[in-house]
Amino acid sequence: MPNTNKPLILVTNDDGITAKGIRTLIDIATELGDVVVVAPDSPQSAMGHAITINNTLYLKEYTAHSHNHKEYTTSGTPVDCVKMASHEILDRKPDLCLSGINHGSNSAINVIYSGTMSAAVEAGIEGIPSIGFSLCDYSADADFEPARPYVKQIIENVLDKGMPKGLVFNVNIPKATHDEIKGVKICRQANAYWVEEFDKRTNPYGKDYYWLTGKFVNDDKGEDTDEWALEHNYISIVPTQYDLTAHHYIAELNTWDFDN
């Protein structure tokens, strides 16, 4: 790995190494540090924090776009990418992990299912400051240019100020032009969720199969949420933690009787 005074930045994603979002993020990251890319060799969206344990895992160097930095692909999940980078590729801990830029929102409850954010969380578990970036546009040809200066500024802030251990940043960017983006807001995760249904169909051989469908419902009317920010053309930053303990309920639970 490069041994310079520049920060070492690990870049990954869940849309695959050829996705336009990660190519944009790599381009920004190379302006700020020494970059190593480890990303899935095919799309791995909505994989959450899955890891590969029952199948073989492959790793190979990817040279189609890399010039002054190293790139690798894995056959595994986004979390596998971070693990492989940390334990097989890099000879020192990265100063920062960047995941994305995802094609599609990872606000509200979507953070739970997101491969993009799970990669960032895995880096956080390993003590690496990390940021997950998502653009609210699922198109393969989405326009990431309006987000570029904000993404760079957020990265520069983290490199300069650091990040408390156990936290990662969930950054979501509205689908908007540069003139329409109003700025950045620090937010909480909205209490919004999916109302899910399964569309049952039958294939030509008479076998039933299902497509997951549904609609996104936001009952949270707070103006301090990521959903509110995105709706009003702000970039949202939610400080996110992997400690899922409901600390506020521990005292109540200690009043229960478990001895009888």
Image: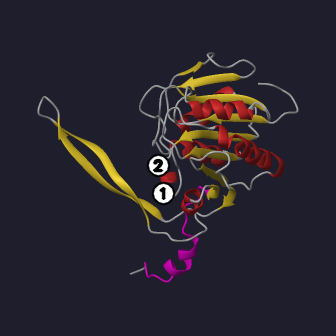
Q: In percent of the image, x 65 and y 23: which residue is there?
A: 71
Circle 1 residues within 10 Å: few <14, some 14–19, many ≥20: some
Residue 237, percent from left and from top: 65, 56
Q: In percent of the image, x 58 and y 71: which residue is there?
A: 247
Q: Amino acid at mark 1?
A: Ile
Q: Secondary structure at mark 2?
A: helix
On screen, residue 113 versus residue 223, left or right, reads left
Inspect the magenta stretch and tell me whether residue 243 lies in it: yes
Give the residues drawn in magenta, as a range.
241-258
Residue 6, percent from left and from top: 84, 33
Q: Nearer the viewer, residue 148 or 164?
A: 148
Residue occupied by mark 2: 113
Q: Which numbered dot is residue 178?
A: none
- Check the image and name the residue furthest to the right: 5
Q: Residue 89 occupies which quadrant of the picture?
A: top right
Inspect the magenta stretch and tell me whether residue 200 lies in it: no
Q: In percent of the image, x 48 and y 45: which residue is there?
A: 48
Q: Residue 90 occupies which quadrant of the picture?
A: top right
Q: Nearer the viewer, residue 173 or 256?
A: 173
Q: Nearer the viewer, residue 108 or 50?
A: 108
Residue 164, percent from left and from top: 74, 56
Q: Which numbered dot is residue 109?
A: 1
Q: Amino acid at mark 2?
A: Tyr
Spatial CA distance of label 2 from label 1 is 8 Å
